[in-house]
Image (cartoon, rainbow, N blue to C red):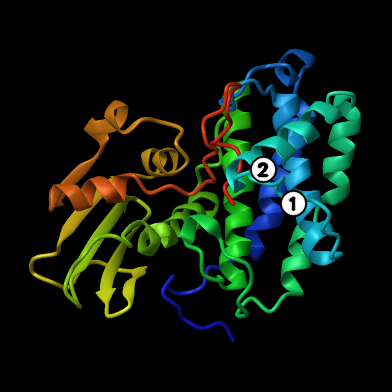
Amino acid sequence: MVTMSKWGRPIDVLPTFAREEQALIDVLAMLTAEQWAAPTACTGWSVHDLVAHILDVKLRRLSRDRDDHRVEQPLPGESLGRFVDRINEQWVLACRRLSFEALTSLIVDTMGQTTDFWSREDLDELGEPVTWAGPDPAPRWLDAARDYTEFWVHQQQLREAVGVVGLDWPEFRLPVVDTFMRALPYTLRNVEARTGRQIGYSVTDTGKWVARREADGWTVDHGSPTSRSPLAMVSTDADTFWRLCTRSVKRADVAEKITTEGDENVCATMLDMVTIIVPEPEPHASRGNLRSV
């Protein structure tokens, strides 16, 4: 039985994995050669490159955590962000040798394996950190939910690149917003407040979340602040929210879609919440919006 933690109540994404995978296959089956070559929001990557990256994420998870095949580590002095950026690029470059048909076949072959892997795990156990949620070991359900958010975000990027409607139905989008909200305690880590102070984050047509200051830090859960004077309140729509969290838009460009109340500095901190690994700047183009580990 899964239990509560500072990251709130568990998220069950297992039923959604298969539907997201099938939606991806449906899109890939209809792509033309021109669409496979179309540029995406991931700088320098085509649709073909993005599909190759999705395959990499799936196979890397299975190889590392299911099969205990761990061979990749950061180089001496290499940050986690640069390490992730480097191995992502290496895989994509190699997969450019593959035809559209071969790449699609490999994606099809992985269908169901992610769901099967996570269904065999004890999701209440602590595992490796979900880095954007903090450096502490995280419950496995949060890691599984993180996997789902990456697949969903990349499929959104793919669909936008080829002009296909996104996976914006509540069954697909709600788990993403709910998962990203679990970054709130870590985002607020430097916000000082007395025990019991509350902060609210509302996402239109999706839900409301409340962060509460406890003696040892912030916690998050579903709901609205019960306090008459919460420290800060932020409200926006789901599309704006996930794009802010993944650095897909700049806050200034979507300011008219955001409402804030209370402490301005705390609201700004909340709007700076990030749910990806952002590589440090390098001379070549960085792809900080690719890997939401």
Q: Residue at x 26, y 35 (%)?
A: 257
Q: Residue furthest left?
A: 228
- Quadrant, the N terminus: bottom right
Instruction: Name the one closer to the observer, 50 or 288.
Output: 288
Question: Can you say whether 20 is above or below 95 in the image?
Answer: below
Residue 26 in sight? no
User: Mark 2 = which residue?
Assistant: 83
Instruction: Name the one closer to the observer, 274 or 147.
Output: 274
Left or right: where does residue 217 sit relative to residue 256?
right
Q: Name the quadrant containing residue 159.
A: top right
Per the image, label 1 sits on a secondary structure element best described as loop
Instruction: Name the one closer to the observer, 61 or 51.
Output: 61
Q: Name which residue type carries label 1.
A: Gln
| Among the two numbered marks 1 and 2 on one chain, the one whose residue lies closer to the N terminus | 1
Q: Name which residue type carries label 2.
A: Phe
> Residue 115 at what x, y percent from top left?
74, 62
User: Mark 1 = which residue?
Assistant: 73
> Residue 235 at what x, y percent from top left?
25, 48
Task: Answer whether labels 1 and 2 touch (C-beta < 8 Å).
Answer: yes
Q: Name the quadrant containing residue 17.
A: bottom right
Left or right: where does residue 185 sit relative to residue 91?
left
Q: Residue furthest bottom?
A: 1
